[in-house]
Amino acid sequence: MGRREQYLDRLGIVRWTLRDATPVPESAAPVELPAQAGEAAPAARADAASWDELRAQVRDCTACGLHAGRTQTVFGVGNVDADWMIIGEAPGAEEERQGEPFVGRAGKLLDAMLKAAGFDREQVYIANILKCRPPNNRDPRPEEAAACSGFLRQQIERVAPKLILCVGRIAAQNLLGTDAPAAKLRGRVHHHPDTGTPVVVTYHPAYLLRSPQEKRKAWEDLKLALRVAAEQPQ
Ligand code: URA
């Protein structure tokens, strides 16, 4: 059994096979999506001059109410020259404890998904919409996402990935500035509004843990992401 097959077995899914050179489908064309209403303006702050300064800005941020309850911020982790950037919603309790995104159960499944696509976790860059943990795992509020959006934009600009894999509806809606439902977000290529980076949306691994029958569709998303990244200039 090959390495990919072993990973897919570990994911608990039927063997997924890559069909080479499949053209990106028509439905992968960029789509215009309506902006979300009622978003607060992001806090005015000059862009950081370096990764260290950006990290310090995040560490010291008090732009929304979440700072009051945090033990530490969760900045992001991985290869700052990565081809793929993974963007989730917000840190959970374990992520806040370790100061790293996707280190809990969902993170282990994310690692397996990345392996199936041919990446070690260290090869990609992983970040969240929010850098602080919302209480009781609630969804990010628009004003919290807006206050954090400049940090994420700077991370995307600095990594300059070929592709963003956005995991989960909430992360995708915030990243793309839309309230479109999950069914409209998956299966096509979007573009990050600020940087133009191609974005593919897939299920959140926490959802896949609850609904393993959807892993097959997640693999379709990963194959789309692989094709789109392969089409980007070197
Ligand atoms: N879920 C997310 O969206 N992000 C994390 O970092 C962990 C769980």
Image: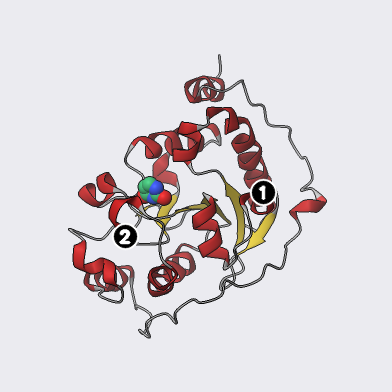
Q: Quadrant location of the N terminus?
A: top right
Res 54 → quadrant: bottom left
Q: Nearer the viewer, residue 55 or 167?
A: 167
Q: Amino acid at mark 2?
A: Phe
User: Does residue 140 sit above or below 19 in this rendering?
Assistant: below
Judging from the image, what secondary structure is the residue with disc 2 in?
Answer: loop
Judging from the image, the colouring scheme is secondary structure
| Mark found first going from the N terminus, 2 or 1 | 2
Residue holding disc 2: 75
Residue holding disc 1: 183
Q: Which residue occupies the extreme left position in the image?
A: 71
x and y, in percent, of residue 18 in the image: 68, 31
Image-based side of 20 in relation to 226, left or right: right
Q: Amino acid at mark 1?
A: Ala
Image-based side of 66 in relation to 21, left or right: left
Judging from the image, what secondary structure is the residue with disc 1 in?
Answer: helix
Which residue does the image show at 58% across and 27% down from the upper left?
213
User: Does residue 9 sit above or below 216 in this rendering?
Assistant: above
Q: Residues within 10 Å of mark 2 (few under 14, many from 20)?
A: many
User: Does residue 96 sit above or below 39 in this rendering?
Assistant: above
Marker count (numbered) = 2
Q: Quadrant location of the C terminus?
A: bottom right
